[in-house]
Image (cartoon, helix red, strand yellow):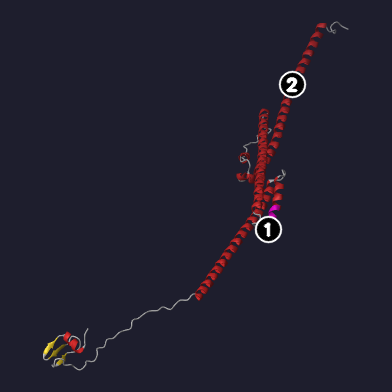
């Protein structure tokens, strides 16, 4: 081997250094590329998880909203809202229910994949909080309905219990005063059933109200029977009084007739004085007491007589002819 063909130690060292540097550079490039790809993959994974987590909050929220709306608009709920508060033992339960059926303002936040990871996480949180609100509203509605139903049932039981006491008193007051005893017997039967149901804690307001209506009908039947007997008694008393008065009048008339037949009434007598008529006696023949002549001039009483040619007074004429008053 020639001296020129043999590599020197210095040349070999340079080559080795160059190869090492190139290898390191290539490794750095590969490492840098791997790091970049890894970061990108990580972000993609985080975004996918955010989308998935957000989407998972949507369906439960929508279902909860549907359930709440269904309960709020149910016929049973709306009828309870319209219920007369007089049928409730606690009127505040009606106010609570009226509040519970009010709409709940909730918006379902978007979970679109186009949103960045941070926004997706924010929206997922909104949906979760909205879900909690809806569930709370649903629970409040259920509680309000239950309390109102319990209040209504309690009031129905109270009313039935009070009516049972009133019915029992009616039975006592109506003894011997009904026209039909069957009405009183029927009321006793209904009272027994009503008292038993009023003490049944499982009975709902529907059963209690129905029994209350039946009890009231039985009570009214007794009252009608009492009234019918009262009117019948009054009519009988009126007829008896009319008959008594008629008999009394007939007796009085008979007594009066008998009295008239036994009583004598003397005929009325009147005295009438007989009519006396004075008739002047016929003139007698003139007498001449003094030898003279007496002549009558004129007619009756008051005539002037002439005796011996002299006029005479009526008194003289009376003595002569006997015509004196």
Out of 170 and 201, give the one closest to the viewer: 170
Give the mark, 2 or 1, whose residue is nearer the N terminus.
Answer: 2
Vertical comparison of 195 with 250: above or below? above
Question: Magenta stretch mostly in which secondary structure?
Answer: helix
Residue 209: image location, x then y, percent: 67, 49
Q: Residues within 10 Å of mark 1 (few under 14, many from 20)?
A: some
Residue 228: image location, x then y, percent: 62, 60
Looking at the image, which residue sits at the far right?
Answer: 1
Which span is picked out in magenta? 182-188
Vertical comparison of 323 with 177: above or below? below
| Mark linked to residue 19 | none
Q: Secondary structure at mark 2?
A: helix
User: How far separated are the C-alphas under marks 2 and 1?
Assistant: 105 Å
Vertical comparison of 253 with 293: above or below? above
> Is 178 left, or right, of 324 in this rendering?
right
Q: Which residue is mark 2?
A: 35
Q: In the rendered image, which quarter is residue 52 located in?
A: top right
């Amino acid at each position: 081997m020639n001296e020129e063909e043999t590599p020197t130690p210095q040349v070999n060292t340079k080559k080795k250094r160059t190869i090492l540097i190139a290898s390191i550079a290539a490794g750095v490039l590969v490492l840098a590329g791997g790091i970049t790809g890894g970061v990108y993959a990580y972000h993609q994974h985080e975004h996918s998880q955010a989308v998935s987590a957000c989407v998972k909050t949507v369906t439960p929220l929508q279902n909860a909203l549907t359930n709440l709306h269904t309960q709020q608009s149910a016929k049973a709920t709306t009828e309870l809202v319209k219920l007369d508060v007089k049928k409730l033992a606690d009127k505040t339960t009606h106010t609570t229910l009226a509040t519970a059926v009010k709409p709940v303002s909730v918006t379902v936040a978007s979970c679109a994949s186009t949103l960045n990871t941070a926004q997706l996480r924010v929206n997922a949180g909104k949906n979760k909080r909205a879900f909690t609100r809806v569930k709370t509203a649903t629970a409040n509605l259920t509680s309000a309905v239950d309390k109102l139903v319990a209040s209504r049932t309690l009031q129905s039981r109270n009313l039935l219990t009070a009516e049972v006491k009133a019915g029992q008193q009616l039975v006592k007051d109506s003894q011997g005063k009904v026209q039909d005893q069957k009405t009183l017997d029927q009321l006793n039967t209904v009272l027994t059933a009503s008292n038993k149901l009023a003490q049944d804690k499982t009975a709902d307001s529907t059963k209690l109200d129905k029994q209350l209506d039946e009890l009231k009908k039985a009570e009214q039947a007794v009252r009608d029977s009492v009234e019918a007997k009262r009117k019948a008694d009054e009519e009988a008393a009126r007829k008896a009084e009319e008959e008594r008065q008629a008999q009394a009048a007939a007796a009085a008339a008979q007594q009066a007739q008998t009295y008239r037949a036994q009583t004598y009434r003397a005929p009325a007598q009147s005295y009438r004085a007989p009519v006396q008529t004075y008739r002047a006696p016929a003139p007698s023949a003139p007498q001449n007491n003094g030898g003279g002549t007496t002549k009558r001039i004129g007619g009756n009483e008051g005539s002037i007589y002439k005796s011996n040619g002299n006029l005479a007074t009526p008194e003289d004429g009376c003595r002569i002819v006997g015509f004196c008053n």
